[in-house]
Image (spheres, rainbow, N blue to C red):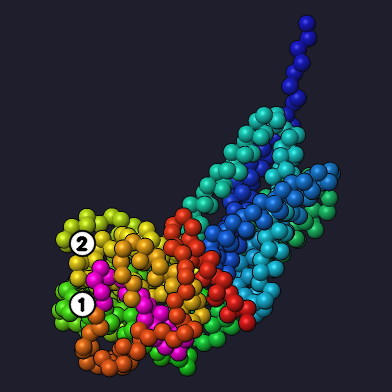
Amino acid sequence: MSVVSPPARAVGARPVEIALLASVFVIAACGLVYELTAAALSSYLLGDSVLQFSTIIGTYLFAMGVGSWLSRYFERQLPAHFLRIELLVALVGGTLPAILFLANAWVPGAFRPLLYGLVMVVGALVGLEIPLVMRILKRNVQLKDLVSQVLTFDYLGALAVSIAFPLLLVPQLGMIRTGLLFGFMNAAVALWALWLFRHELRRVGVHALACLLTLAAIGAAFAGAERITTVAEDKFYQDRIVFSASSPYQRIVVTRGQLGHRLFLNGNLQFAERDEYRYHEALVHPVMAAQGAPKKVAVLGGGDGMAVREILKYPSVEQVTLVELDPNMTTLFSTHETLSALNGGALKSPKLKIVNTDAFQWLQQGRLGADDTFDVIVVDFPDPTNFAIGKLYTSAFYALLEKRLSASGYAVIQTTSPLVARRSFWTVATTIESVGLLATPYHAHVPSFGEWGFIIASRRPYRQPDALPDGLRFLTAKTLPLLFDFPKDMARVPTEVNRLSNQVLVTTYEQEWGKVVAH
């Protein structure tokens, strides 16, 4: 009776196996980083985060499938092919965020095709990696162990990056340096492979030179990442950038030019120093003055403190609660000397309580007792460019908002342009009314934005005030009624309710503002 012995393992097989499995962990992490940076950048710059993440991830996975299919044509010199692919992934994937930032600033028309072209290239290269590793490992590992081990390390690498990307990498390094760091890691895997398979490779010196040049190029780009970001953003924003930072929630940029300081979040203008007073006076005073003697006020969004500045002009105010998702915003506008001066030091007021959390969750978590209602609520969110913001314009949100209003209270919502985005504007009015509140729309001209709209939500009919605080630069009691007059081209049109389940407002907004951008 004979016994068939398993194939003998090659000398040094175990160290090679461990090294390659560790490489699987690294290349899985790198591949996911490139996918996430492309998706995040597209949502920052193109809006509609759900659409962008969905299409980028779908394209990337399709490209990986193409790469996996192409791997069948690599038959000989597998370690050499693996090494070259790692260097290509390092160069293309590592520089992807930098290339896209520069393209958006200098050739914006080419951004979208370049984005998907790079995603296809990187995805195909990443799709080649795992099949090649498995075929190299197959020489020393049984199939059942091979598949389980490779997939285990692949999934572990993806898990590590999915946690680190939003919590650590982007806030600490930014998009460009994150991409370059993982490009460096891919190149390091190639260098590792060079050492492991040095006895199998032809022209080892050429491979070594390619590895060193790639590492040097990525290292130089990493050292100059701040300069790359500055060049791209200076071109995009035109004015000199005085502050920029990436948070887990957004890209914050403050510029200074002929219009004074301007704040941009994810590339979208939030205010210009020259005329922000028009916007914030129109936002705050029609409801504050109409309420009579408001004591408790809440501001949702508005982390720049400008709305709080206007609210504090009322002596009756005893407490202001500012709910701002991004702590970087409230820190910046309370500590930066110049920016703090713009809001008059409002964020340092003893009457102010800052809560850094999601406004939707904050409304849900309250006890809803007498101490949790407000005389005035100012809702100053960015426009609904994506579904994450769009949820703050839904009937579910306004139903929660209604519970926080005192019996005689008013809420006011900034509501995009009734001229440019007419259906979007009236969709918000319809949505407010769907939860049983009265909607009173008005508008004001803000040169930096054009004709801009607001809507007052209340249980009782809105009554215009007879007087406004002294010292306002834009509004007067005499001109206030003009804000509530809508000409024919901004008059109400039929719209549907914006619900969490459909988020129709995001699609409508993108369609209306997209026409403006296209022209």
Is 241 situated left or right of 82 in this image?
A: left
Residue drawn at (28%, 82%) of the image = 286
Instruction: Kindly indicate the quadrant of the structure image that contains residue 466.
Output: bottom left
User: What quarter of the picture does the N terminus occupy?
Assistant: top right
Is 304 situated left or right of 425 in this image?
A: left
* Vertical arrangement, residue 359 with respect to residue 111, above or below: above
| Residue type highlighted by circle 1 | Gln
Q: State the mark number for residue 67.
A: none
Which residue occupies the foreground of this view, 330 or 474?
Answer: 474
Q: Which residue is mark 2?
A: 372
Which residue occupies the foreground of this view, 91 or 455?
Answer: 455
| Residue type highlighted by circle 2 | Asp
Q: Position of residue 73 (x, y in %)?
A: 83, 46
Question: Is residue 294 in view from this perspective?
Answer: yes
Q: Position of residue 54 (x, y in %)?
A: 59, 56
Residue drawn at (27%, 70%) of the image = 458
Residue with the most extreme top position: 1
* Vertical arrangement, residue 513 with respect to residue 209, above or below: below
User: What is the span of residues highlighted in magenta in the rendered image?
Assistant: 441-462
Whether residues under marks 2 and 1 lie with C-beta atoms below 8 angstroms apart, the answer is no
User: What quarter of the picture does the C terminus occupy?
Assistant: bottom right
**How many marks do you count on the picture?**
2
Disc 1 residue crowd, few under 14, some 14–19, many 20+, Cα 10 Å: some
Q: Which residue is mark 1?
A: 291
Question: Is residue 309 in view from this perspective?
Answer: no
Q: Secondary structure at mark 1?
A: helix
Q: Position of residue 185 (x, y in %)?
A: 62, 56
Q: Position of residue 155 (x, y in %)?
A: 57, 43
Q: Is residue 106 magenta?
A: no
Residue drawn at (22%, 92%) of the image = 470
